[in-house]
Amino acid sequence: MRRAEFITAIILGLLSVYLMWKAGEGPEWDTEYVHWANTGINIDGSGPGKGFWPFYLALGMLVSCIWIIINTIRRTSPPSQSDEPFMDGYAKKMLLLVGGGLIGFLILIDLISMYAAIAVFIFYYMQILGRHPLSLSVATCLVVPFWLYLFFDIVMTKVQPKGTRWIEDTFYNPVGTFFRDQSLLVIVLCFAVSGAILAVIARSARH
Amino acid sequence: MEIVSALMDGLWIAVQPHNLALAVIGVIVGLFVGALPGLGSVNGVAILLPFTFVINEATSDPAAPMIFLAAIYYGAMYGGAISSITLGIPGASTAVATTFDGRPMALQGNADRALVTAAVASFIGGTVATLFFTGFAPILSSVALDFGNPEIFALMLLAFATFIGLGGDDIPKTMFSIFFGLLLATVGFDTISGEPRLIFMNEREQTAVLETFGAGTEAVPFFDSVSWFSRGIQFLVLAIGVYGIGEMIWTINASRYKVTMTETTISFRRIMAGIVGMKDAWKGTMIGSLLGFFVGILPAAGATPGSLMSYGVSKMTSRNPKSYGEGNPDGVAAPEAANNSASTGAMLPMMTLGIPGSPTTAVLLAGMVIWGLEPGPRLFEDRPEFVWPLIGSFYISNIVAVLVNLAFIPLFLAVLRMPFTILAPVIFVLSIIGTYAAYDNMYDVWLMVLFGFGAYMLRILDYPLAPAVLAVVLGTTAEEKMRQSLLLSDGNFAIFWNPFFDRDGKGQEWWIAPVTTWIAVILIVLPIIIWAVRKIRGGSPAEA
């Protein structure tokens, strides 16, 4: 843990230095600008420049990082006194599985649409990490995106990504036309019926 | 009389069917979120904030989205006790103190009594605080109308100093968190000069990078930092990243999907017996109700210190302090009354001064800004149609929360039995779809997940993240007020700390900024003084 705290503080300190440098940059179009000129407190009587506040904030970050490093070296912070690893085997495996799943989910959104990606992610999570019965995983990964689709795309018209053109034309456009023609009561019934099916499957899976 | 009349109007609007329905739904959602181990009001409010855009559009009522979120806030305060008592794992940091006596009561077979005590104490705490809020808020907002830029900046400084001086976290890490949050708020365009700032790669550099990688001059989305960062870093992206993704991963790792629940039997007769048994917990309830409110109104203090302090004071003033920690009902009532009372108290500086009293109110404040409201002293003058229905909803939500809580305790216990491997992916999905719904682009979704991973790493190393969230919310205003103050003083910082500074009659309430600044300075220096005193007395630096 101590080494991780030390390395993190070094990385964050370097980030602070970079941000201090960036704060001193001028506009791209001003070729006569001198670096740091906008970090002054009273530029031409018009108060602090645009870089003043970010520069000193980044400086504050740097000072904090130096303080953290000193505490780590002197072993006065709880992580620097701890013998536990930064991440044990379980934490690494979990981060890989959950984090990898999330990254995969985000990549899939642009390819197969938001709702299909949600279905894949929930199925993956419940099967790989949860080891739930297949029936429950399948039911959940179908019902949850269906609810979200009805809520966002149909009821609230907050349209989510639909993947490739082919997927949108072949699947979402006809389905969307169908549901938009229905009354709110039908939509609520769809919510309720799908929820009831999920509850029944969950109950039988538990037994 | 004017306040009573305004409150009655507000109550009438709050009980309109759509607002009442939102309050009920919000309370139920809040109870669920609060009951889930590791998740609290801030997680619920942050994850569900994007959904309020929809409520705003659907109802056209300015108060409706806030009524929904405030109800979640209330519900979560009630819900936190359920997991603290039955699982021994606090639903959120605000319910940590409830575990001290709630868990022993459950292990002694009195879980039902502990749950009823927590619910009734929460109701009393929330109601007392709402009465205080109704009385104090108009007065404070009328006083705050005279505040100028230096006063508001000094109050923000005080909010950050409270985190450093009273937060109890590692000081340099808290400072880093505050500076980092404030810096994130500066990304995008400078509001005063209109020039781009901290967009990381300007077009020239971006083209050079793309050419280096042989990608041609056509910017591919991943490298398009100009269009990514010139939009600024949206508060919601950070909040959902930290509380929806980071905290969830952290909770999964900490709980390792394994919790043991104490079996609890609840019936109407046992609930009534629990209510009668409140006579043993009235003292803790009153201490929590009063102390919680006043700790809650301190900028950036919030419900967690309020509940811990109330527990401490209740124990300290008890005739039998040794019974605390072994299942004393006062030990459940004090923190529960306090966290509800403090959650209302924390709304006072948010609504009257525009300075949140807790991380959850920071998210609420950001929500108000997103809906086109300007929190601060003028809110009571300019938007009474928003303020009074909201205050009315506090009373309604409190009643709804205690009824729903007592009536559906078995249901919440059933939810707690739901495997985390079902809840976790659903929360991840809500975070991602909610972020996309709010901003309509994948850049913010990627950034949100990135913040989530970063928050998880920093959390392991004890970096407090609430100060960063608060700082992002206050960052833009803090910079604006500071720069305008320095413009007024020709770049002289004495305007903030010197009561004799000549403002040429441009400012009012000259004493407020210096007094507030000096209190902030004392709060910042306080831990160093304590450390030095302990060192002189012979304690080790680590103890200090």
Image: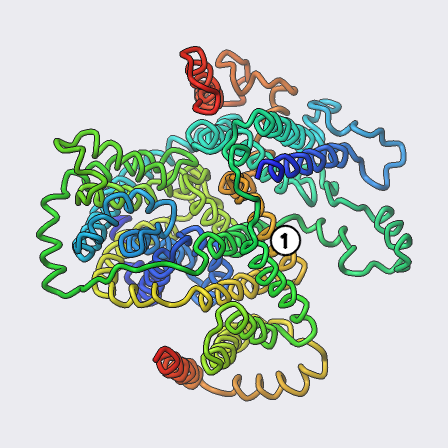
Relative to B45, A153 lies left or right: right
- Mark 1 element type: helix
In the shown orientation, is residue B122 left or right of residue B493? left
Q: Nearer the viewer, residue B162 or A52?
A: B162
Q: Residue B349: percent from the left, percent from the top?
A: 40, 38
Quadrant showing the N terminus of chain A: top right
Task: Say which amino acid is labelled 1.
Answer: Leu
Residue under mark 1: which chain is it in? B
* Percent x, y of residue A159: 59, 72
Using the rendered image of the protein, determine whether residue B10 is visible from the camera's viewpoint: no
Q: Residue at x 30, y 42 (%)?
A: B97
- Asked whether B422 or A133 is in front, the reply is A133
Estimate the x, y position of residue B157 in percent, counting from the top left. 51, 29
Is A49 rendered above or below residue B400? above
Residue at (14% x, 66% y) in the render:
B267
Q: Is residue B121 visible?
A: yes
The vertical placement of A82 against B71, above or below, is above
* Residue A12, horizontal then vertical, whole percent: 66, 37
Q: Determine which quarter of the picture holds residue A114.
A: bottom right
Q: Quadrant of the C terminus of chain A?
A: bottom left
Q: Up-down: is B26 above or below B319?
A: below
Q: Mark 1 = which residue?
A: B450
Instruction: Give left or right: position of B112 versus A196.
Output: left
